[in-house]
Image (spheres, rainbow, N blue to C red):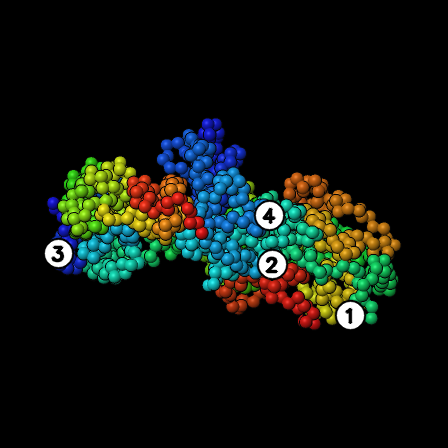
Amino acid sequence: MERIISARFDIPNADQLDVYLEHGGYRALKKVLTEMTPEQVIEEVKKSALRGCGGAGFPTGMKWGFVPKDSPKPKYLVCNADESEPGTFKDRQIMEKDPHGLIEGILIGAYAIGAHLAFIYIRGEYWYLKEKLERVIDEARQGGYVGRNILGTGFDCDIIVHPGAGAYICGEETALLESLEGKRGYPRLKPPFPASVGLYGCPTVINNVETLAWVPHIILRGGEWFHRLGTEKSGGHRLYSLSGHVVRPGVYERPLGYPLKRLIYEDGGGIRDGKRLKAVVPGGASSPILTAEEAESATLDYEPLAALGTMMGSGAVIVMDEDTDIVRTTYSFIKFFAHESCGWCVPCREGTRWMVKIFERLLRGGGTERDLEMLVTLSDNMFGRTHCPLGDAAAWAVGPAVKKFRADFERYLTRRGAVAAD
Amino acid sequence: MTEWVKITIDGKSYSAPRGRYLLEVCEELGIYVPNFCYYYKLPPQAACRMCLVRIENIRKLQTACTVRVQDGMVVTTNSDEIIGARQGMVDFILANHPLDCPMCDKGGECELQYMSLTYGNLFGRYMETKEHRDEYQLSPFIWLDPQRCILCYRCIRVCDEWVGDHALGVLGRGAHSEIIGNKRDGTLECENCGNCVEVCPVGALTSANFRFRARPWDIEDTITTCTYCADGCQLKLSVRDGKVVRAWAKDMTGINMEFLCLKGRYGNEFVNSPDRVHAPLIRRQGRLEQASWDEAIGLVASRLKEITATHGAESIACLGSPRLTNEVLYVLNKFARDVIGTPWISHIAEHDWRPLFNMLTAPLATQNDIRSGKKTLLLIGGNPPEYNPLTAYSLRYAVRENGSRLIIVNARPLLRLPEESEFFHIRPGSEPALLLALLDESQLNLVAEITNLSVERLGALRRALEESEDLVVLIGPEVSGAALEAAGALGARWATERRRVRLLPLMRFNNSLGALDMGLTGDLPAPEDIGAHIKALYLVGVDPIRTYGDRWREALARAEFVVVHELFTTETAEYAHVVLPAMSFAEIDGTFTNNAGQVQRVRRALESGGERRPDWVILRLVAKGMGVEMDVRGSAMAMLKDLAERVPGYEGITYEQIDAEGAVQTHRALVKEVSWNDLLDRLNAQVAALDRNRDMLTEPPALGTGLFERGTLIEHVPLMAQAFGWDGSRSRDDR
Ligand SMILES: Cc1cc2nc3c(=O)[nH]c(=O)nc-3n(C[C@H](O)[C@H](O)[C@H](O)COP(=O)(O)O)c2cc1C
Ligand code: SF4
Ligand code: SF4
Ligand code: SF4
Ligand code: SF4
Ligand code: FES
């Protein structure tokens, strides 16, 4: 299978401008700026059926098309490099190994929506990547690819790298905008959507690192080509972050519609130490857990995963072997969500704390049947009722786990239901 | 233009204005949708998730407080699913909430208590340890109990939007989120208006003066008018056991909606002060000693008669306070002019506003005028956030809700007004020149030089007025003399068929305008006059030493006879021969006229202790002692009737009408013909005399310049004295 977005990952020094240029770099940008109108760029991306790789899977071309052309306000492109979804580490690979590819994608996106300033909002822990990206942008500026009058075409676009301060919620696009504006990272009310009222009240597109990094390839080889690589509704390949109890964890570029089983057994080399598979979280901590049986038949694509009650998310596949205690993994997820809940809305703020406390009691040995029901009830009371998807994710991390792996939970129940209420 | 759409709620069809929030539409239709974080005229928050409803063809339940109604919308507000969701939310909110309502100050008037009654489960399902957090003081006026907080963010939004102080925020994340103040240690440095406390649905924010002093069912509320600034907020005084325990505005009946400032909210407990004068005092051997009413009245009457006999009635000057009710001021004016027969009847004022009213060519602007409809608001001088807080609130409201244009002309940048306002920074004292520019376009060069604004900027200012269709000009006390007349004439200059113009003088005292209307318009005697041709002073609620400084100290010492009606033994009272104990605004009925010319009720909220009497009763008794039976009827209500027959503009105003309408507008005759040449001559003369070299001021006036100012009444409020370090006896130490 041809590697596309990861093709330059193994080329030494591909993060340097000259090496990047040698391997086809900035050709797409040149094509766009000299041969294409913004509308044509958007059209090409629409044709590609590229869907956002940040988690929500929204069609990218359509998102770009929402930006009002007649707005007198400046427009902005924001690259979401917050990469905080547990299990996800693909954007890091791009920024580390093929950063110019990302810069090129950003510039093309900016051209398509009419932005002259772009931001990369990068998670604070990637401070070394921030420094790297700044060097890369400088290099590109010197080469005439960033800044004023890019490639002599009259198109101006600058890129600013801004670090986050360690909050998962700031990966959510509107909280990200708040944070970028220097405010506390709370998700905004929608509507209005960022495409009309975004950064500083101006039309803004927010895209994931990987999403943008795909764009130059689509421009060079055509939307239809890209679409054909994937499935009917979702074009192309994706970078899957494979982790957990597999022999070869790592980032794998595979198409949409790829069988989960192949990813685990062929690419990942199967379960470590010859153990049996117990469960898989297919799309980062925000996606509901699958049992081994479900994982058998799962394909990595939006609709099939939705049919199994879970989702593609950020393409982070977390594999768990037979020795895994689902109570503890679920506890670790819910603790994460409780820690990262921004606190804006009642069900997520209070629900996550409540569930954490129930888990802690379970783990101490003070749990009862009633607690398991309570976990399911709390998850039901949260799901679909929160202000942003983080609350849904938290509910999803717990409810399905309790239902599907009840035996694991029952091991923690005290025999006669004595409640260790303190 | 409102567009009406058809919507279906719970199977019934209704029409509703397109784009309104569904929750508000339901509320108006009488369909109850529970809510916590929704609040009238605040941006929606969508935090409490209590208002979830089902809208046809939308997968998830939706928050009614954020959804705007659209044609054909089909809504369910009541189903098992929705009730379940609400119960779930109450469960969440109560999880870590201390369930000790009997120990909570909010008990009995708590929105969470009500909600639990409807949607709470009989048994708590939360079996875990609660995370206790101690309550603490955010400021001298405000306490926070973080564990009771349900994070509805009303307080933050109110501070941002209503008050413009941006003093509250959130610290921490998730379940560790906590409301905190703006200071480094998390406490507050702010106006201390207490509006955040007022809107808090639960017992999280409480007021230092009220907390744990009463329960809602053992207080009696009386709606009355604030006794501080001229904006004239309506407030409820809660009284328990004969003491004022709080002031609030929750029912939003007044011109102030739900807003109150620091003074209106926390400044009323002087009424309870043990330092109040409770019986008549007569000076004997240099010391004020308690006396009987008969003795005191007898002494006052006989001394006034003697002085009239020896020096003539014009040797007696009467001075009233602009805090007195119209009824009292009306009787005082009659007393001075008819009983004593002196032309020296005036009131203490921070500013002489008479020129404006002598040249008034436009109606006065009410708070509602400022707040309704899109308009241009021109603020010349003044500092509303400090001296007219309700006006500041209305200005913010106008910009926020209607997108009105706010233009500020001031010698200093002002804080706590909307960022969107346009600022014209002028040289201190150059306000008259600015008015000249508004009246006479030919003098922009001169005005530019004096004000330090460019001719282009002045042109832009004039253009802004030209573009306006609805103009309100707010005039601060920096505008005086001919410039004030010029301000009065702005109506004649700028009003057209297409442009409405209204004026608002930023007066200082709650009844400044009433004092003018009631005829206390004579000149104020100069301190040198006292002892010279003015021999006696009849002072009702005024403390000229306090207001005008030490020159009055010697003046009062020179007077042959000084009588004061007072609540406290002020510095002036120390020079008085007789002090008569008066009743406060909370103990009498009456009316005040605010700076917009609206007459509002003052209602008796409690019994006055001691031997105090209302001022008008005292005046009548003194008159009687002098052998004159005043034609003053027995009650405040009857007095208003008299007054309404005689005072121009007050015709026909009755208590019934005020009770029904809240605020009743007086009819002010407008000047029809302005003699422009004369006016411009006077204005040019004033402008010519201005100092053109004064340095520009770049610093905004500090927070509290006006709000935290010490005054005769407010210094007797224990919480204020404590908060601002007033040591109760300053007036004495200073002597
Ligand atoms: C709680 C939360 C965290 C998120 N974190 C990230 C993130 O770290 N990186 C990212 O690209 N998208 C993240 N998203 C998704 C973004 O909101 C948004 O959908 C995405 O950046 C859009 O880009 P795309 O269309 O290219 O995927 C997050 C969403 C939520 C609700
Ligand atoms: S769901 Fe959680 S993270 Fe999202 S707004 Fe609510 S509290 Fe914040
Ligand atoms: S008292 Fe007033 S100024 Fe202070 S925080 Fe509360 S609302 Fe804001
Ligand atoms: S303190 Fe009161 S008003 Fe403020 S967020 Fe908490 S509950 Fe709401
Ligand atoms: S704004 Fe004026 S009238 Fe209103 S409460 Fe404050 S002082 Fe009283
Ligand atoms: S009232 Fe709608 S979410 Fe609180």
Please give left or right for residue B472 compared with residue A94 in the image: right
The answer as to whether the residues below labels 4 and 2 share one chain is: yes
User: What is the C-alpha distance between the residues marked 3 and 4?
Assistant: 71 Å
The residue singled out by tag 3 in the image is: A11
Answer with mark 4 or mark 2, whichever residue precedes in sequence.
4
Instruction: Say which mark, if any, is on residue B477.
Output: 2
Instruction: Say which mark, if any, is on residue B249.
Output: 4
User: What is the C-alpha distance between the residues marked 4 and 2?
Assistant: 28 Å
Q: Residue at (24%, 53%) from the top-left corner?
A: A89
Mark 4 against mark 2, which lies toward the viewer? Answer: 4
- Residue type at numbered disc 1: Arg
| Residue A253 in sight here | no
The answer as to whether the residues below labels 3 and 2 share one chain is: no
The answer as to whether the residues below labels 1 and 2 share one chain is: yes
- Tell me which corner region of the image, top left, top right, bottom left or bottom right, holds residue B548: bottom right
User: What is the C-alpha distance between the residues marked 3 and 2?
Assistant: 75 Å
* Residue A22: image location, x then y, percent: 12, 56
The residue singled out by tag 1 in the image is: B558
